């Protein structure tokens, strides 16, 4: 049996299992018969296995260079090294939808394991049914529209090769996987929300949904981060975020999910904000589909033009169904889930809702900015695009408000404010002032100084919260502070984890402000042996050479860099700047050499070289402060998320989950 | 607001549907359309020399519509396009000149490709990428439809479907 | 809700709305062709636009030493001279090829800040420009 045949059969099997699963679970719902739920659980296992076999066959076909399989012929090559072959399944459209579908089957299977535990048999049919329906959509799309296992009648001797952008950096190998794990992960909260709305049990879904959302959120964050990192290290313009529609597409679901993580806490505690939660969850999931639709339909101009095709229309249908279903259900139950009490703004609930509203607004603004060119064109016929300045202009005030709330929120007690709180806020505001002043003394711009202030303010908030908790515990139990800290940190994982994540966010904000404000770009053509003194560095071009590599050809221009003043500190070394030529791409790809240091980050790009005599090379240097710390912040956020999710924590929190209104 | 959800959904749907219909990736290259096709002459591949001579290309005195197809043996869509073009060449060979231009390829591979699909319409071999300079194409396959007077009627980027090919032929034979 | 919160919320919402709508208007980057520019030249002066067209044959002039790139963008009817400095042209860039330049008009010259080669990834791009073999040969001959 050939991998192409096996993969194709497994794919159809997965589609059939998904359809059967959907039918069976619908029977379970309408006949109220438990046995159907049990068979649906088994079917979800079968669908997962079929998906795995299908995905495995695609990998197998790639590994053995079977170019009779259309996907392999179009997206792989004999020359590719092993690691590139292993990531080729998600290098192009068909394969990445297959990966998406596979991850969906895995999530459906995981949810089916919760049936009878946290997911009672009343809600299970709707939750699983939603997931099966999504699964049917994806497998149908693969089988009928974007099949990677098409048969190439006269297999070519070699394939057309993998997208060079993917091969250029290992980060691109993990970025799509994280992204899909996050995107698909948001289908589970959506399914839970649907189940809650259909079964009219508006409270019980929230704890487990928050857990699932946090998992998806963690993957999304990792996906966005690896994407940023990749574009910083590869694209050669020295930035990491350009507000391109494709980037926005990943940010929008993240923002809605973040909003939910905040309001969800309130519902878990005292049952408020139900409609907000249903709304945020629906929008978060719809946004993942919206993002895929944007990147795959060619509706919006983007520099990352993906292959578009008939899948765009299908994603549009899917997007509209998700929106219609989510919003329709929500509007049907909206009168039943009106909040009973009123929210005090000067309380934790108020701050959490405020924060969530900011995230929601931000998401809305990003959506608006992304589709605005389309709206303008529809009404005036003029072709336009929205530049990054718009997004920067709007995200700065929103970001500042978020950082302010991020500090205050956790310090406010539930329900109302007290005297201790006023003192804490005063201390934080003093930190804010000192930080800002300090920035001004250093001669930084007002924006960067303010961000420094906000960093200090958030640091103060976290410090106050942790130290007061530790002091109380150590004095009431008579134990040393270190032990009290340890006990608190391990028994209140959610709280400490959120401190860690918030700290990471504050650090990220600080580094973004610095790096966006103080980036310097220079460019110059050097002859071999010539030196160039700039930005505290002395750069000497050593030679211009060429090298043949397995799947590409490279032009190399090694340079020697010496730091000559404080600005250039940390830049010393010999670097191979290079341009890579891939046979399937007519433009060479520059691979920047990035040298991180604790403060400045040095970035060397070979732009052009003397193709006739190899005498000169044009180099671009970009010096950006604190980029290293942006990545450190990413690791801190990831650590905080894992800290919350670590299995021990779930057990502790599950006790809180039993609906204890008025807790 | 929420009560009006069908309106929001329909609005979004309408906007995106319109957006998808509008997009036209080769908008910019339409510059060549309606202008005289650049003339060129390139060496023919070996199997066609007996019938057509050693060189062939486009010149304004052909007096016959031309379907200029740019292809390469390594391009997958070209593999599916080749039998289609061959079929239509057989049908229309008296009225329309089907001319292939092989680019970015080795002669041996191109010959193998021709043999594989038994292509009888002539193909020239463009070693130096002249056609790229003259016509500014940006990928394979790409097809130019040139009318009797030597004006470019249309350019088609990417694989031709049978319906599209029929449409172009109808247009050019009117 | 107390009236003072209502007012505060309304203020915040108003400021945001102003920022968003104002920002949307100001930061629109029009995408035009040379012909469209000449129809309404005043309107596009000194604002960010994207100009699209073909690089006119014989108009390309690039000096690698000063990194100044000059060429003429044409849509077959009208022509606009473009100046771009401080950056090297991307390799797919060339005469008779589609190009999109982002920048501003200064008088009759378009000063480009960003140069995008118009190309599509929907199907295989040709291995144009230099092939690896050619580049290697060139460099080897030089050394």
Image (cartoon, rainbow, N blue to C red):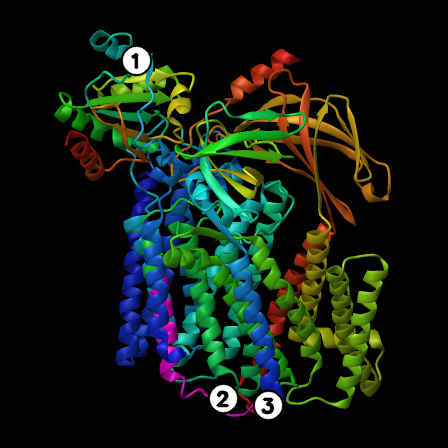
Q: Is residue A289 left or right of residue A9?
A: right
Callout 3: helix, strand or loop?
helix
Say above or below: A551 vs A109: above
Q: How crowded is mark 1: few (under 14 residues within 10 Å), some or many (20 or more)?
A: many
Question: Considering depth in this image, is A341 or A527 the residue closer to the camera?
Answer: A527
State yes or no: discs 2 and 1 in contact (Cβ < 8 Å): no
The residue shown at (39%, 22%) is: B134
- Which SS type dominates the magenta stretch? helix
Marks 1 and 3 sit apart, C-alpha to C-alpha, by 85 Å
Residue A138: tell me if it is visible. Answer: no
To the question of a shared chain for discs 1 and 3, the answer is no
Q: Mark 3 against mark 2, which lies toward the viewer?
A: 3
Give percent across and percent down for residue A561: 79, 33
Residue A622 appears in which quarter of the rendering? top right
The residue stretch that appears in magenta: A319-342
Mark 3 and mark 2: Cα distance apart in space: 20 Å
Check disc 3 and report the residue beneath it. C3
SS category of the residue bearing label 1: loop
Which residue is the site of mark 1? B45
């Amino acid at each position: 049996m050939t991998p192409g045949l096996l993969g194709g059969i497994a794919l159809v099997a997965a589609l059939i299992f998904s359809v059967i699963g959907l039918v069976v679970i619908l029977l379970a719902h309408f006949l109220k018969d438990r046995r159907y739920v049990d068979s649906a659980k088994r079917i979800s296992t079968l669908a997962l296995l079929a998906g795995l076999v299908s995905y495995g066959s695609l990998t197998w076909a790639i590994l053995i260079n079977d170019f009779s399989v259309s996907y392999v012929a179009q997206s792989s090559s004999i020359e590719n090294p092993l690691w590139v072959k292993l990531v080729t399944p998600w290098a192009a459209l068909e394969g990445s939808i297959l990966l998406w579908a596979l991850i969906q089957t895995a999530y459906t299977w995981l949810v089916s394991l919760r049936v009878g535990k946290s997911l009672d048999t009343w809600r299970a049919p709707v939750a699983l049914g939603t997931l099966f329906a999504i699964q049917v959509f994806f497998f149908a799309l693969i089988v009928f529209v974007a099949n990677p296992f098409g048969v190439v009648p006269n297999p070519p001797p070699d394939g057309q090769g993998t997208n060079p952008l993917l091969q250029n950096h290992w980060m691109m190998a993990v970025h799509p996987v994280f992204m899909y794990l996050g995107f698909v992960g948001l289908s589970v909260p959506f399914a839970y929300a649907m189940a809650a709305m259909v079964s009219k049990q508006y409270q019980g879904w929230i704890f487990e949904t928050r857990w699932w959302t946090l998992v998806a959120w963690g993957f999304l964050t990792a996906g966005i981060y690896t994407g940023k990192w990749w574009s910083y290290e590869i694209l050669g313009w020295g930035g990491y975020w350009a507000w391109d529609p494709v980037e926005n597409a990943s940010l929008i679901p993240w923002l809605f999910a973040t909003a939910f993580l905040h309001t969800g806490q309130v519902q878990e505690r005292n049952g408020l904000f139900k409609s907000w939660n249903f709304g945020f969850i629906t929008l978060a999931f719809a946004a993942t589909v919206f993002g895929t639709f944007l990147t795959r339909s060619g509706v919006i101009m983007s520099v990352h033009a993906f292959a578009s095709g008939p899948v765009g229309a299908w994603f549009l249908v899917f997007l509209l169904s998700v929106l219609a279903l989510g919003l329709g259900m929500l509007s049907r139950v909206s009168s039943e889930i009106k909040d009973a009490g009123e929210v005090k703004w000067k309380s934790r609930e108020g701050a959490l809702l405020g924060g969530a509203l900011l995230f929601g607004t931000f998401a809305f603004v990003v959506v608006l900015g992304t589709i605005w060119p389309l709206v303008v064109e529809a009404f005036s016929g003029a072709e336009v695009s929205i530049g990054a300045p718009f997004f920067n202009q709007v995200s700065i005030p929103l970001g500042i408000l978020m950082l302010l709330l991020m500090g205050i929120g956790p310090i406010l007690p539930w329900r109302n404010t007290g005297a201790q709180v006023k003192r804490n806020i005063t201390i934080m505001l003093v930190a804010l002032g000192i930080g800002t002043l300090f920035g001004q003394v250093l001669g930084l711009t007002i924006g960067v100084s303010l961000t420094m202030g906000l960093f200090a303010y958030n640091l103060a908030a976290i410090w106050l919260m942790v130290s007061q908790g530790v002091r109380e515990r150590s004095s009431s139990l008579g134990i040393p502070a270190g032990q009290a800290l340890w006990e608190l940190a391990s028994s209140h994982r959610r709280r400490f984890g959120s401190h860690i994540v918030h700290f990471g966010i504050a650090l990220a904000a600080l580094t973004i402000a610095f790096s966006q404000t103080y980036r310097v770009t220079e460019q110059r053509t050097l002859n071999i042996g010539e030196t160039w003194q700039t930005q505290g560095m002395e750069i000497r071009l050593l030679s211009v050479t060429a090298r043949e590599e397995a799947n590409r050809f490279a032009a190399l221009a090694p340079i020697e860099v010496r730091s000559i003043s404080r600005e250039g500190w940390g830049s010393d070394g010999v670097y191979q700047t290079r341009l890579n030529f891939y046979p399937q791409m007519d433009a060479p790809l520059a691979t920047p050499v990035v040298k991180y240091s604790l403060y400045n980050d040095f970035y060397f790009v070979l732009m052009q070289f003397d193709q006739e005599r190899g005498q000169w090379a044009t180099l671009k240097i970009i010096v950006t402060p604190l980029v290293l710390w942006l990545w450190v912040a990413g690791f801190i956020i990831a650590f905080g998320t894992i800290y919350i999710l670590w299995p021990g924590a779930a057990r502790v929190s599950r006790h809180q989950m039993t609906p204890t209104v008025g807790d | 607001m929420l009560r009006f959800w069908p309106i929001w959904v329909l609005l979004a749907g309408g906007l995106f549907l319109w957006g998808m219909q509008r997009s036209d990736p080769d908008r910019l290259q339409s510059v060549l359309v309606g202008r005289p096709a650049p003339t060129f002459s390139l060496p023919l591949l070996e199997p066609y020399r007996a019938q057509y001579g050693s060189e062939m290309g486009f010149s304004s005195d052909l007096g016959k519509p031309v379907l200029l197809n740019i292809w390469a043996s390594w391009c997958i869509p070209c593999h599916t396009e080749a039998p289609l073009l061959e079929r239509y060449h057989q049908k229309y060979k008296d009225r329309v000149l089907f001319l292939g231009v092989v680019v970015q390829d080795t002669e041996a591979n191109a010959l193998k490709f021709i043999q594989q699909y038994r292509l009888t319409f002539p193909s020239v071999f463009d070693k130096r990428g002249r056609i790229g300079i003259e016509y500014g194409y940006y990928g394979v396959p790409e097809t130019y439809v040139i009318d009797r007077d030597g004006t470019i009627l249309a350019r088609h980027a990417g694989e031709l479907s049978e319906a599209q090919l029929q449409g172009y032929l109808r247009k050019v034979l009117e | 809700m107390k009236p003072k919160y209502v007012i505060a919320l309304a203020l915040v919402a108003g400021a945001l709305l102003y920022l968003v709508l104002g920002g949307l208007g100001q930061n629109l980057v029009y995408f035009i062709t040379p012909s469209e520019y000449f129809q309404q030249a005043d309107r596009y002066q000194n604002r960010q636009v994207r100009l699209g067209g073909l690089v006119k044959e014989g108009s390309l002039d690039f000096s690698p030493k000063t990194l100044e790139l000059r060429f003429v963008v044409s849509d077959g009817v009208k022509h606009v001279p473009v100046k771009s400095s401080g950056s090297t042209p991307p390799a797919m860039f060339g005469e008779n090829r589609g190009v999109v330049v982002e920048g501003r008009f200064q008088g009759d010259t378009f000063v480009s800040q960003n140069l995008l080669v118009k190309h599509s990834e929907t199907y295989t791009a040709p291995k144009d420009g230099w092939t690896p073999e050619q580049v290697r040969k060139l460099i080897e001959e030089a050394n």
